[in-house]
Image: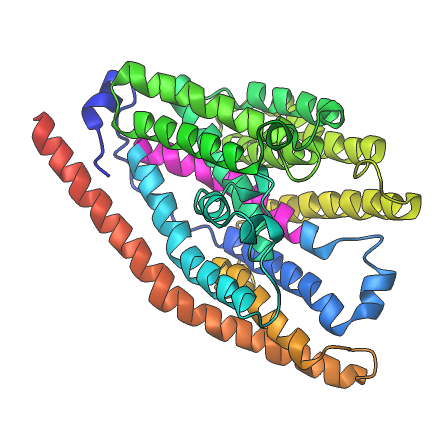
């Protein structure tokens, strides 16, 4: 990828020259806490079915963890784009941040399924291998009605849609996106989302046609944004916006209101960042931000998980979703208030490798489920011991993948961006 500085200047988007902000350890501590919650959620069926039976109807540890992650992404991702002032640099950073380890885990998960060792490939992937692989490569599989090969991949679909929208808003707003307006529209979308049909696009076009069409539109829009002139970049940004809204509203795997609630949560994180940096008026901003968790909980109570679920399960979903959303917000806001204080070092260190922990832990959990097919007869102390062993194994393997996969990929991406920027500066001078 080559940074098109001339095109960005033509769009009024000059490269920022300020130094990056110092690493915010409170966000690392939050990441560490969030990934522990997700790991614990995935250990329940394997080791602690009693907790699953008694606690899960009231609180979803996994949903809590990923909502904290979504708030963190919203807080840091748009700021990263705006600091760089370069859409190309932003996408290069995101791709080298996400894909190298994702490819490794996706291959391992697919191998587990093909043998099969611990699971089987989803029917949509096994029956449509090209479309299934393409859906995963775009990281949009959760919006293409294709189940993830590794269960935690679904959150990356929301990250990718968020990147598309952040990029589009940055370009269409000429570097000055109207965060509160976007947030107000998102809140309205949450409240109206239960009236929208989930999966309507795939139902109308079919799985393969939808995957190929969405991939073509996404690739062309991204190419226009990264390499086109000013007008073509704006056209690409508009296409990105339309694509993201269509996927969110009429083709998510879950209900549209949930999908929009997740994106609203991410943009609320952006608004909190702007509030902390004096870019928003406090009174109005706080009210609009506060509407996001309120609307997310109200939509859960009003719409629930959709039709066809027994009343007791639907009620459990409403409680567990609402409690997880409220707890995630309270955790994030509490750590934000305490951000000037030193954070617990174990959580900070775990946060540094949290992406590796998040992606690799499902593989080890499935190994555990093969070793302990029925946790019922196993004494509780032994199950706790198994849990500690799995946790240590996950953290150890994540430390290795962070050291030998993530960090080299980050470094290579930085070198590539620097060389591309230097060549672009020389060419424009």
User: Relative to 50, is 128 above or below?
Assistant: above
Which quarter shows the C terminus? top left
Magenta highlight: main SS:
helix
Q: How many labels does the image show?
A: 0
User: Relative to 399, is 18 above or below?
Assistant: above
Give how far across and how far down residue 391 sits, in percent: 60, 74
Q: Which of the 4 image quadrants contains residue 221?
A: top left
Given residues 26 and 175, the one toward you in this image is: 175
Given residues 343 and 329, the one toward you in this image is: 329
* Residue 81 lies within the magenta run: yes
Q: Which residue is painted at 75% across and 27% down in the image?
A: 194
Q: Can residue 7 be seen in this view?
A: yes
Residue furthest toward the front? 127
Left or right of 202: which side holds 395? Answer: left
Magenta segment boundaries in residue numbering = 64-87
Q: Which residue is painted at 57% across and 69% down in the image?
A: 116
Give how far across and how far down residue 300 sits, in percent: 79, 36
Residue furthest toward the top? 231
* Residue 146 lies within the magenta run: no
Which quarter shows the N terminus? top left
Q: Is residue 348 visible?
A: no
Q: Which residue is painted at 52% across and 63% down in the image?
A: 109
Give how far across and how far down residue 18 sits, in percent: 29, 36
Q: Which residue is painted at 50% across and 19% down in the image?
A: 178
User: Relative to 354, is 311 above or below?
Assistant: above
Give how far across and how far down residue 97 sits, in percent: 38, 51
Left or right of 336: which side holds 233? Answer: left
């Amino acid at each position: 990828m080559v940074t098109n500085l001339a095109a960005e200047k033509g769009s009024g988007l000059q490269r920022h020259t300020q130094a990056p902000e110092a690493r915010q350890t409170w966000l690392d501590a939050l990441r560490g806490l969030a990934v522990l919650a997700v790991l614990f959620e995935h250990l329940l069926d394997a080791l602690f079915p009693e907790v699953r039976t008694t606690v899960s109807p009231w609180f979803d540890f996994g949903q809590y963890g990923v909502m904290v992650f979504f708030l963190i992404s919203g807080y840091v991702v748009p700021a990263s784009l705006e600091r760089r002032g370069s859409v190309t640099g932003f996408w290069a950073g995101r791709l080298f941040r996400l894909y190298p380890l994702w490819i490794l885990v996706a291959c391992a998960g697919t191998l587990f399924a093909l043998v099969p060792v611990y699971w089987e490939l989803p029917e949509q992937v096994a029956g449509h291998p090209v479309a299934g692989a393409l859906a995963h490569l775009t990281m949009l599989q959760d919006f293409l009605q294709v189940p993830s090969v590794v269960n935690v991949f679904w959150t990356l679909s929301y990250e990718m849609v968020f990147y598309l929208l952040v990029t589009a808003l940055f370009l269409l707003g000429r570097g000055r996106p109207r965060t509160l307006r976007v947030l107000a529209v998102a809140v309205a979308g949450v409240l109206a989302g239960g009236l929208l049909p989930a999966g309507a696009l795939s139902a109308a076009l079919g799985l393969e046609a939808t995957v190929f069409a969405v991939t073509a539109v996404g690739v062309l829009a991204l190419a226009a944004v990264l390499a086109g002139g000013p007008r073509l970049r704006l056209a690409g940004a508009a296409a990105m916006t339309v694509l993201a809204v269509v996927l969110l509203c009429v083709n998510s795997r879950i209900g549209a209101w949930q999908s929009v609630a997740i994106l609203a949560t991410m943009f609320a994180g952006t608004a909190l960042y702007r509030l902390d940096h004096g870019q928003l008026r406090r009174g109005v901003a706080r009210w609009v931000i506060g509407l996001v968790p309120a609307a997310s909980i109200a939509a859960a109570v009003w719409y629930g998980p959709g039709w066809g679920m027994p009343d007791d399960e639907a009620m459990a979903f409403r409680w567990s979703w609402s409690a997880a959303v409220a707890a995630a917000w309270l955790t994030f806001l509490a750590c934000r208030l305490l951000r000037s204080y030193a954070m617990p070092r174990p959580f900070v260190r775990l946060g540094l490798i949290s992406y590796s922990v998040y992606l690799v832990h499902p593989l080890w959990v499935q190994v555990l489920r093969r070793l302990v097919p029925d946790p019922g007869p196993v004494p509780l102390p032994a199950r706790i011991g198994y849990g500690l062993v799995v946790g240590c194994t996950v953290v150890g393997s994540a430390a290795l993948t962070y050291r030998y996969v993530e960090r080299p990929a980050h470094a290579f991406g930085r070198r590539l961006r620097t060389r591309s920027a230097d060549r672009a500066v020389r060419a424009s001078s």
